[in-house]
């Protein structure tokens, strides 16, 4: 009865609803994007196919996290979250092949590929740009599957900004965001704070019966553990001249994952929690040398440290107070033990030059240093390093109005693997104003990470697994090709893209049969499986992505569909033949769909000095769905198919209704997983989805902004377009 009343209340909001979409569809196509070429283009004219999730769409959907947003608004992504981070897939390839950028800079996380996406605060996002396919020629390693660029909101105009966003949901899901910004003359400051907490949930108390000696139905293992994380980000900007900008930015991030302990030693006894300590610092600048030339530079430092925080007295391998390594060293409650400390320093110098004959030239230099310290997990006295330098160049050439050609080349030098050239080519033809035809070919290049080469660790999860690095790994290369068409006619847009991505020497964890582990592991653990990073002989992903959208006045409907097929082959030395293996997490079919209705009440033609007696209230409703077919894995079963529905409402009141200039309020409320689907697969086996079932949420935002301009999206690495709006 309680759920029925809640659903009825949400449907009553539906009767009221918010924003004219006819013009929004046009402005959406005029959105300026930067990720595909590293230079600015309107979305409809971007030479490289780009998907955009706008600020308005983010507010309408009301996603709690970046995982929620991407899986809910585009069909190309899949996630399998666990304590180590977000197991993300994009068109069949996993985390380590997907480059995540924040304002054009690499997100730093686990170099093994399991990024903690809690570092991304949804309340700071202005828009998200998604480019699929190999982009290593422009962005270097990690960009074999594609690039996700998170563009954050900036504040660099005179005045004061104060903002508070508080979100609450089921299972004590709390999301807190605060911003304070001000600008005085040539100097501006913007400070962000975010806090995320969840009590976690348990979808089942049953352990996988094939991995335990007897059936366990009262395990304390959680589907998602209780966790808390917080982050502070400070950004300072200084503009000494009209054509010269400098910035400095720093952040601190902490996360703790609380793990309950049960009574079954083999599966659910936990004696330590997990803790992450991240930090970053960067400085940079942009010089607009002339109307046709811009030069930028950035220096970034990032740290990602991972600890065990003990909750009970535990004997483990560790270091005593004098720095001597000791077997079975005792750790007591609240003491911590460093597992890995990963640091990255990068320098980047880039120039963009408009040349005669419709040419735009981009050229850059990158220097990267990776440092990994893991006392219990890495040889070489616990520390390894890696250095990479790169030169790249790209030319955008438009010989005729209907044709845009882009070519690029990158030269990498890695300390362990030498030199490598990576090319790319793309073309866009626009025979009419409403039709775009695109084709692209690009190569990818990725050297093994220090963790893939040297790491070793034991993971206990319904059995004990030993994971091993491999110093014999080879770099991975890829060939990506795509063709697509896009139609945009009066509020209607449709795009279809077919692609194939062939990866050579793909690195993946592979189970080693009949492996005899080192004696220290045999004595301390009851090992069930040993897995090692190995080069697959080859791998291939092939698929089709379809996107459709229609907007008319207050209504918008649309969706996306992704078909995917993958295969990989590996040499089996034990049987002297090639064997076919699965790319973990692959699903043949994924889809998303939405229907929204938005409307504004009053104030449409009101001047700012006449707002006191007027009402400006925007109210909206959104119905969203997403589905996936079965997900396939090499071990521990397949993930079940599912489909989930979401009902979201938004309520916006601006200064004309509040009688205070610069003050606005926004309320979001909704129901996720309306039909209460729960995957109760036993622990230790793969889930199709980790959702706990039907959940409810509400978000309240109040913003006071007396600056001359509102938030402005700005990437200091890129030349600004005169037509870009604040």
Image (cartoon, rainbow, N blue to C red):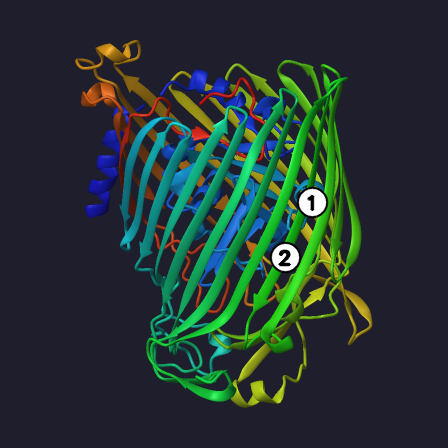
- In this rendering, would 220 be left or right of 360? left
Q: Residues within 10 Å of mark 2 (few under 14, many from 20)?
A: some
Q: Nearer the viewer, mark 2 or mark 1?
A: 2
The residue at the far right in this view is 576
Quadrant placement of the C terminus: top left
Comparing 72 with 370, the one in front is 370
- Residue that label 1 marks: 136
Q: Is residue 287 visible?
A: yes
Residue 486, picture quadrant? top right
| Percent coordinates x, y for residue 84 in the rendering | 48, 63
526 vs 156: above or below: below
Q: Is residue 134 visible?
A: no
Q: Which mark is residue 694?
A: none
The residue at the far front in this view is 240
Residue 655, picture quadrant? top left
- In this rendering, would 331 be left or right of 526? left
Q: Which mark is residue 369?
A: 2
Q: Residue at x 39, y 34 (%)?
A: 188
| Percent coordinates x, y for residue 386 in the rendering | 67, 61
| Percent coordinates x, y for residue 216 in the rendering | 39, 77
Q: Residue at x 27, y 24 (%)?
A: 662
Q: Secondary structure at mark 2?
A: strand
Comparing 673 with 413, the one in front is 413
| Percent coordinates x, y for residue 365 in the rendering | 69, 43
Q: Residues within 10 Å of mark 1 (few under 14, many from 20)?
A: many
């Amino acid at each position: 009865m309680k759920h029925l009343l809640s659903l009825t209340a949400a449907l009553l909001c539906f009767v009221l609803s918010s924003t004219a979409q006819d013009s929004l569809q046009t402005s959406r196509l005029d959105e300026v994007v930067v990720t595909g070429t590293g230079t600015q283009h309107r979305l409809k004219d971007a030479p490289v196919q780009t998907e955009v999730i706008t600020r308005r769409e983010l507010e309408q959907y009301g996603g709690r996290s970046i995982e929620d947003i991407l899986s809910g608004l585009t069909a190309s992504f899949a996630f399998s979250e666990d304590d180590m981070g977000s197991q993300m897939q994009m068109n069949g390839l996993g985390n380590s092949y997907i480059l995540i950028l924040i304002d054009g800079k690499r997100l730093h996380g686990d170099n093994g590929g399991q990024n903690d996406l809690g570092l991304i605060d949804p309340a700071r996002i202005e828009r998200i740009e998604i480019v699929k396919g190999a982009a290593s020629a422009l962005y270097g390693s990690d960009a074999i599957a594609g690039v996700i660029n998170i563009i954050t909101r900036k504040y660099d105009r005179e005045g004061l900004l104060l903002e508070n966003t508080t979100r609450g949901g089921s299972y004590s899901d709390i999301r807190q965001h605060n911003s304070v910004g001000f600008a005085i003359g040539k100097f501006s400051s913007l400070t962000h704070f975010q806090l995320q907490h969840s009590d976690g949930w348990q979808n089942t108390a049953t352990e996988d019966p094939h991995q335990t000696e007897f059936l366990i139905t009262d395990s304390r293992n959680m589907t998602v553990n209780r966790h808390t994380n917080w982050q502070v980000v400070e950004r300072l900007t200084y503009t000494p001249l009209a054509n010269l900008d400098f910035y400095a930015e720093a952040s601190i991030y902490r996360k703790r994952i609380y793990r309950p302990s049960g009574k079954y030693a083999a599966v659910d006894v936990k004696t330590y929690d997990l803790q992450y300590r991240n930090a970053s610092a960067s400085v940079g600048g942009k010089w607009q040398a002339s109307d046709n030339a811009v030069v930028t530079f950035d220096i970034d430092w990032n740290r990602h440290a991972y600890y065990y925080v003990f909750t009970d007295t535990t004997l483990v391998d560790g270091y005593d107070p004098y720095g001597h390594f000791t077997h079975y060293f005792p750790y007591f409650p609240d003491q911590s033990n460093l597992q890995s400390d990963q640091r990255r320093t990068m320098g980047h110098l880039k120039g963009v030059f408009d040349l005669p004959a419709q040419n735009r030239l981009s050229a850059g230099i990158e220097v990267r240093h990776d440092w990994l310290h893991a006392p219990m997990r890495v040889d070489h006295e616990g520390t390894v390093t890696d250095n990479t330098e790169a030169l790249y160049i790209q030319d955008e050439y438009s010989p005729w109005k209907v044709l845009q050609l882009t070519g690029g080349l990158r030269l990498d030098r890695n300390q362990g693997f030498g030199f490598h050239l990576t090319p790319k080519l793309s073309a866009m033809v626009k025979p009419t104003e409403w039709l775009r035809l695109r084709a692209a070919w690009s190569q990818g290049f990725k050297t093994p990470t220090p963790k893939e080469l040297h790491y070793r660790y034991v993971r206990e999860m319904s059995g004990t697994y030993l994971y091993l690095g491999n110093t014999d790994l080879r770099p991975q290369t890829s060939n990506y090709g795509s063709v697509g068409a896009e139609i945009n006619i009066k509020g209607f847009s449709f795009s279809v893209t077919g692609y194939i991505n062939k990866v050579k020497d793909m690195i993946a964890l592979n189970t080693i049969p009949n492996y005899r582990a080192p004696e220290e592991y045999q004595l301390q653990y009851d090992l069930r499986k040993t897995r090692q990073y190995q080069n697959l002989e080859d791998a291939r992903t092939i698929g089709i992505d379809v996107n459709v959208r229609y907007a008319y006045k207050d209504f918008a409907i649309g969706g996306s569909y992704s078909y995917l097929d993958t295969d990989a082959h590996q040499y089996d030395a034990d049987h002297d033949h090639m064997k076919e293996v699965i790319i973990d997490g692959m699903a043949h079919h994924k889809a998303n769909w939405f229907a929204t209705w938005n409307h504004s009440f009053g104030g449409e033609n009101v001047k700012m000095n006449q707002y006191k007696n007027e009402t400006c209230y925007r109210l909206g409703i959104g119905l969203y769905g997403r589905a996936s077919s079965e997900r396939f894995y090499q071990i521990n079963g397949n993930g079940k198919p599912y489909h989930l529905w979401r009902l979201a409402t938004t309520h916006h009141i601006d200064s004309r209704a509040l009688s205070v200039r610069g003050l606005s309020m926004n309320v979001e409320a909704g129901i996720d997983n309306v039909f209460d689907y729960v995957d109760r697969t036993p622990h230790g086996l793969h889930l199709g989805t980790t959702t706990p079932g039907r959940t409810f949420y509400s978000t309240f935002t109040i913003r006071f902004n007396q600056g001359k301009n509102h938030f402005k999206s700005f990437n200091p690495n890129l030349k600004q377009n005169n037509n870009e709006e604040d």
